[in-house]
Amino acid sequence: MEFGYDKLLIALLSWNLLTFLIMGIDKRLAVKGKRRISESTLIMLALLFGAVGVLVAMPVFHHKTKKPLFLIMVPLSLAMNVLMAIGIKSFFP
C-alpha cells in the first residue's frame, strides 16, 4: 500500500498556513485590545505540526518575538515536528 506523501505534504502546508493566520488574527486582536487567543493554545498549535507556521508568523506580524516562552518553545516544537515526521515516515515506508 502506498502512503500518500503528496497528500500529507498538502495537509501539513495547509495546517501551517492556518497556524500562520491564527497568529495574525491574535496580533490583530492584541492591537484592537480585544480578547486574545491564549499563549498555551498558540504553543499547542506549534507542537501539533504547526511550528513552521508559528515560527514564520512571529517576525512577519512582529508578534510574540520577545516572549521567552515562544523563543524557546517554538524552535523546540519545530525540532519535535521534524522528529515526529521522521518517525511517521519510517513507520510508513
Image (tube, rainbow, N blue to C red):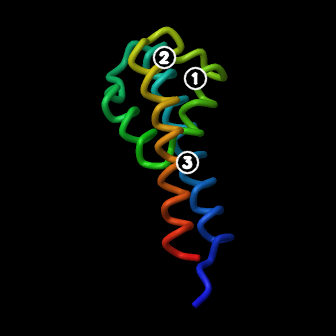
Residue type at mark 2?
Answer: Lys
In what element is the residue under mark 2? Answer: loop
In what element is the residue under mark 1? Answer: helix
Name the residue furthest bottom: 1
Which label sits on residue 64? 2
Q: Which of disc 2 and disc 1 is earlier in sequence? A: 1
Which label sits on residue 58? 1
Marks 1 and 2 in Cβ contact (< 8 Å):
yes
For image coordinates 33% across by 35% down, the residue present is 41
Residue type at mark 3?
Answer: Val
> Which residue is more in the foreground, 9 or 89?
89
For image coordinates 58% across by 56% down, the residue present is 12
Which label sits on residue 43? none
Disc nearest the viewer among 2 and 3: 3
Check the picture and name the quadrant holding the N terminus. Answer: bottom right
**Where residue 22 appears, x then y in whole percent?**
49, 36
For image coordinates 34% across by 25% down, the residue present is 39
Marks 2 and 3 in Cβ contact (< 8 Å):
no
> Which residue is more in the foreground, 19 or 44?
44
Residue type at mark 1?
Answer: Met
